[in-house]
Amino acid sequence: MNTNLPTLEFILKNYKNFNARATRDAFIAYWKHIEGGGKMFLAMAGAMSSAQLGITLSPAIRGGLIHGMSVTGANLEESLFRLVAHDSYKDFPDYRYFTKEDDTKILENRMRRVTDTSIPEDEAFRAVEGLIVPVWENATKNNTRKFWHEYFYDLIVAIDKAKHEGPADECWLLAAAENKIPIVVPGHEDSTFGNIFASHVKHGDASANIVKSGIEYMTEFYDQYQTLSEGKGVGFFQIGGGIAGDFPICVVPSLKYDMEIDAKPWAYFCQISDSTTSYGSYSGATPNEKITWDKLTKDTPMFVIESDATIVAPLILTALLECKANPKEANELIEKYKN
């Protein structure tokens, strides 16, 4: 095995058919797009931050493999939680066999279960609340307005490193903030801190106006997309379904038909989901349907990987990082295993 490219060689040698083949082909097309000077936009739904995707996503951001992001409010805040409260998380590998009483005990222990792990109420939610509420209050007094992620960007870079419990180099939010990655957080109200913010607005501690709206996210994204799509274009790498993917992918037809700007289509598309994509499905439409909405074209490289993103995404990102570090060897290996 090539010691510089072990993950790449594993994928090329073993992933021949079915979802494995889709993974291999999507990876190769991603690499060729990046190598050719293209950019990549990541849309991330689900609970990927709680699942510690940052272990591979953070170096991918720092390595120039991700150039823009759309994430749910939950993924945004949970990356921060993992940084400041990592040691207080508790895992539940036997969660499939839990009773209602077992989950009630978890609640009573002030934990919030996310599949086989949990977020600690006091060390995560309440600790971060104590840090961010004064920021909201100050913004209210000064009548300043920011996007939702900007408050988290500012907070995560300002937090004393002594408060870090999780490895900083595995925190994707910190990597994105330090590299000034453009980001949209559609539907951020549907998150723990969206709820916490709403409560402080209701109590009168903060004004709802200090957070820019989803519409303002899209108007900002009009400009960001045109910058990202310069040259070889920008691809769309999607984990899960729902608004994290649906919101940003619509920028192309909106630029074309609403803004009357000749925007490029997305240059690549891949979705990883363990829910079968179908017409009308919450998990997302099949890529061909997106052609009819003028988001993709018949020539766009399109891939659907029906598998667990916590397994597939780290493999793809690790292989891409290997390619980035050893491009000549990587291309020779891809050529070797092309059949």
Image (tube, grey):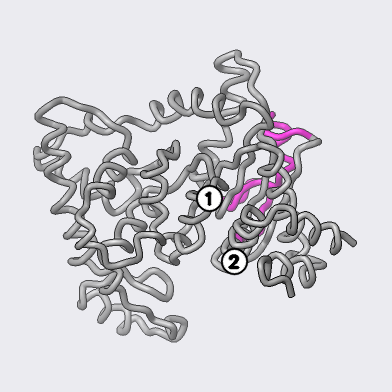
* Dominant SS in magenta: loop
Q: From the viewer's perspective, tell me whether residue 263 is left or right of residue 187.
A: right
Picture quadrant of residue 188: top left
Nearer mark to the viewer, of 2 and 1: 1
Q: Residue at x 66, y 67 (%)?
A: 4
Q: Of all residues shown, which one is farthest toward the top?
A: 260
Q: Residues within 10 Å of mark 1 (few under 14, many from 20)?
A: some
* Observer able to see residue 7: no
- Magenta residues, start to end: 273-297
**Which sits in the foreground, 74 or 128?**
128
Q: Residue at x 42, y 42 (%)?
A: 179
Q: Residue at x 14, y 37 (%)?
A: 206
* Observer able to see residue 173: yes
Q: Residue at x 54, y 66 (%)?
A: 310
**Element marked by disc 1:** loop
Amino acid, disc 2: Asp
- Dot 2 and dot 1 residues touching (CB under 8 Å): no
Residue 337 vertical placement versus 226 (above, below) = below
